[in-house]
Amino acid sequence: MIAGIELPESGSIEVDGHEMNGVAANERPINMMFQSYAVFPHMNVFKNIAYGLIKQKTPKNLVKEKVSEMIKLVQLDNLDNRMPNQLSGGQLQRVALGRALIKEPKLLLLDEPLAALDKKLREQTQFELINLKNKLDTTFIVVTHDQEEAMTLSSRIALMDKGQFVQIGVPSEIYETPINKFAADFFGSMNFFAAEVISHNKQTNEICAKLKSSNILITGQTKNHFNSGDKVTVGVRPEKLGISTSGSVSEKKTILEGQIEDLAYYGNRNLYRIKTNDNGVVQVSSQNVKRSESIHLKWKNKVFISWENSANVFLKT
Amino acid sequence: MIGLPYFWLLLFFFIPFLYVFQISFSTPILAQPPYSKILNLSGDFSNWLQATLDNYLFLLEDNLYWVSYLKSVKVAFISTLICLLIGYPLAYGIARAPRQKRHILLMLVILPFWSSFLLRVYAWMGILSKNGLINSTLVGLGLIDKPLAILYTDVAVYLGIVYTYIPFMILPLYASIEKLDSSLSDAASDLGANRWQRFFDITLPLTKPGIIAGSLLVFIPAIGEYVIPTLLGGIDSLMIGRTLYDEFFLNRDWPLASAVATILLLIIVLPIMWFQRNQQRTN
């Protein structure tokens, strides 16, 4: 709809204050990079990138100049005459990018730009995309289902579910203060506990709730509005949980007791699945700070999980 | 297993061709079969080869053969062009139709093959003749005073050839249009190309293999077509297929007919070789 391939049933789309409804796809200041790249297979790199300019009836010498510049920018030097079937996946992606940027659009749409690349290349290309964006005066809209890609590429994220916006904000905002369970679960993983609100101070935003399974009281801050007696879901990110074999009680912390049910070694971190005494399952991710060959926590070990009150996220159910 | 296609080609193409080819160097005689042997191994060893180029020289001398070759090439070429102009939009329409409808539409293209070819040509005679369907309708509507002469003209020949061979054009075109990635066209549109530019920049060049394949499948059988010009064409619609038939069966001049066939084969093989080279270059 933004590119003009499909038309909206209601509402309007504006670019830089200009209404876009009624402007044909080929006349919008918007270009798109397709998921399949859609590089024209019968044209070489130069002709692919030049296509948009030629359709604009740009003078020949200007086309040559601009395309050469673009070829440098997307790092395809000396590949002008290659045909698409002679290029690698990463090079094709850059041809598609160069072709979409050649008309200097106000807005560039990227549909899953990195989905077709392998993991290493994807990470590298992510940084190249950010660098490129910073060099140009173009807004990038990236469509992706990869949460990591969304986090690293964007300055603002609009999270969508079933055609509706769930939350719009900067990456850290969505990660740290997700608006609901979907948003919380989409970016990273999260442990959820069912609880009941005891009190909510609307001036200080302080909230106190009781976990349903264990009757433990937990406190925290929230901007969502609750009344006492409301059902609430408390979410805690796995990396915010601490794990130890001995527990010490503190007012600022919540502590649960349990038994290690599963553990996974990722190299840079360990992931534990812990069955708590009230029969819930909690995931804990702990960074592998010290270098040691053996994991001192073993399967079936009794452990204490603790986390700071500030880690609690209160979500409407 | 790799040798199998070559074996096939040898058995069903090359050996029969060699047989015809050697007859074209012999002289006609009143015998069974009606041509002289070109290898004489029993007699004097110095003149064991009794081949002659007379048949080819005769082809050059007599206007009749050149005229019918040229006429055949012209008819085949124009028919191919008409098939392409009608077939491309049809194939495009079928390829872009909803998936469930495509099978029905393709079936409609192939359906005429389920009835006899001769029967269909006779049906055209009925439609085109002086008191046929077209003329009686036009006269009945008062659009013309007396029936148009369509049957036994070149128009009828073109009509018959286009009608008969258009499925051979549509099917390869359909195959190449159908597998065309529609996002290429969307990308061109996004970069500022209008409807026609998209067609000429993207769709047409990328369906070239289908266009070439379809054109060859129409051109090759059309050039040697015998039945359609004989039944629908007039006296002057003299195509090479007819000439070939007459030489073989009316004049019983097998050597000359073989020479005609050899030259015809050359005319057909050349475009195929051009096509093959073209294919190899694009791959």
Image (cartoon, coloured by chain):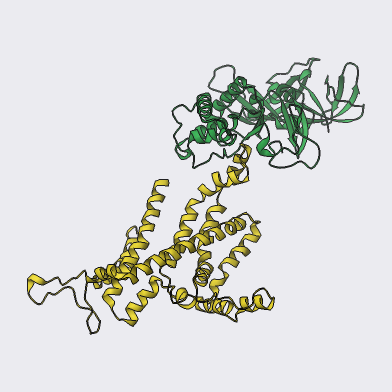
On screen, residue A286 above or below B229: above
Outermost front residue: B145
Q: Colour of chain B?
A: yellow
In this structure image, what is the colour of chain A? green
Depth check: give the residue in front, A78 or A23: A23
- Residue B265 appears in view: yes
On the image, the x and y values in percent for residue A159 come to 73, 32
Quadrant hosting residue B27? bottom left
Up the image or down, A47 lies above or below A236; here it is below
- Give left or right: position of B106 versus A284: left
Q: Is residue A280 visible?
A: no
Between B82 and A290, which is closer to the camera in this rendering? B82
Q: Nearer the viewer, residue A63 or A309?
A: A63
In the rendered view, tell whether residue A25 sits above or below residue B2.
above
Identify the image quadrant of residue A223: top right
Q: Residue furthest bottom?
A: B31
Q: Residue at x 40, y 50 (%)?
A: B278
Q: Position of residue B112 (x, y in %)?
A: 56, 72
